[in-house]
Amino acid sequence: MASEGLAGALATVLGGKGLLVQSCDSEPPGKPLSPVRLRKNVCYVVLAVFLNEQDEVLMIQEAKRECRGTWYLPAGRMEAGETIVEAMQREVKEEAGLLCEPVTLLSVEERGASWIRFVFLARPTGGVLKTSKDADAESLQAGWYPRVSLPAPLRAYDVLHLVELGAKFCQQAMHPLILPQELPCSVVCQRLVATFTTVQSVWVLVGSVGTPHLPITACGFTPMEQRGGIKVATLRLLQECLTMHNLAVETKGLLGLQHLGRDHMDGICLNVLVTVAFRNPGIQDEPPKIRGENYFWWKVLEEDLQKQLLHRLQESSVVPLSR
Ligand SMILES: CC(C)=CCC/C(C)=C/CC/C(C)=C/CC/C(C)=C/COP(=O)(O)OP(=O)(O)O
Ligand SMILES: [Mg+2]
């Protein structure tokens, strides 16, 4: 029964869908976490990459004093009460004049839990391109520019790798289409699909307090957790049940993303794929021993799930999560 529930949960997360966050298995030490609030203790930024059939990129010319006249991709800070997609659509409308729909998340970047940027590949669905006659406080104008000859000066060079990521995805999708799932969450946290693999088998780490579930770790806001980025929260949870010195842990990327943005639910849950391996080469046919009673390794026997997991692991078929 427990494993049926787990198989269902794993299939849901591997399919890019979400699951309610009931509670966190690991929290930073100190006082209990309070719900996060947009613009108070978290700032989310959205950004959109558009590429048309002529291999041109949608660029906007910034109007803000600190970067006036420079060129960038449509981007901006999320506002309270918006979903991530609504924020992206608003920024694109304000800065480029276009209506659009998201195709997929291309990348998520973080500087600790308090700064997270969601990068989308998007396509226009209407609207009118903003010209210099429509210049306002949001932008001076927008335009399509050849990918290999972007306008200058750029506001920041990160445009270059984001555009390349978009172009690469258009040529050959590296991961399934992933869009944010509208589910409430009060903190910034990560649900781990933490795997241990051998030639024959795949195991997934499971939290056993209450109903067996994919473990969730809350991200903290202490200077240490901010400096180290959200990976610290993953390592904290693993440290609570594994002896880490002989293990290598790698966050491969995102399988999905959950956020609501309404009813004061400003938290997010990142569903991440993590690998746990022994540092020392050699034949290890069992996962590392678990300390305590709060977790166990679940051997994934369902053929289809095992195949999906191995595919995601071998091809790095996940949305990049970077710092
Ligand atoms: C924000 C995160 C996690 C990463 C930033 C990644 C980097 C290095 C970006 C390059 C430098 C840059 C352009 C930083 C600005 C980040 C920021 C606060 C964007 C908000 O977008 P704006 O376009 O300034 O906001 P509005 O459109 O809402 O005015
Ligand atoms: Mg902006």
Image (spheres, rainbow, N blue to C red):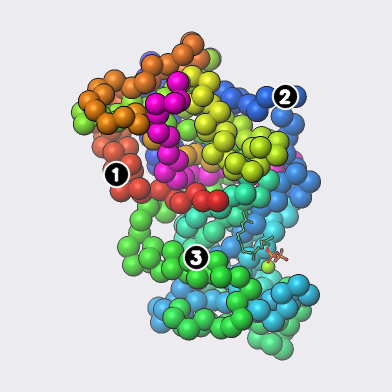
Amino acid type, mark 1? Gln
Q: Which residue position is annotated with label 3?
A: 162
Residue 269 as seen in the image, left or right of residue 200: right
The magenta stretch is 243-266
Residue 269 as seen in the image, left or right of residue 301: right
Does the segment drawn in magenta span residue 157? no
Does the CB distance between marks 2 and 3 fall below 8 Å?
Answer: no
Q: Quarter of the image for the N terminus: give it.
A: top left
Q: Which residue position is annotated with label 2?
A: 30
Determine if residue 296 is in view. Answer: yes
Amino acid type, mark 3? Leu
Q: Residues within 10 Å of mark 1 (few under 14, many from 20)?
A: few
Of marks 1 and 3, which one's residue comes earlier in the chain?
A: 3
Q: Nearer the viewer, mark 2 or mark 1?
A: 2
Q: Is residue 47 above or below residue 247?
A: below
Q: Residue at x 63, y 73 (%)?
A: 155
The x and y percentages for residue 48 are: 55, 65
In the image, ligand 1 is in what quadrant? bottom right
Q: Secondary structure at mark 3?
A: helix
Of marks 2 and 3, which one's residue comes earlier in the chain?
A: 2
Q: Which residue position is annotated with label 1?
A: 314
Rendered image quadrant of residue 86 = bottom right
Q: Nearer the viewer, mark 2 or mark 3?
A: 2
Q: Residue at x 47, y 57 (%)?
A: 106
The x and y percentages for residue 14 are: 39, 39
Q: Is residue 41 above or below residue 3?
A: below
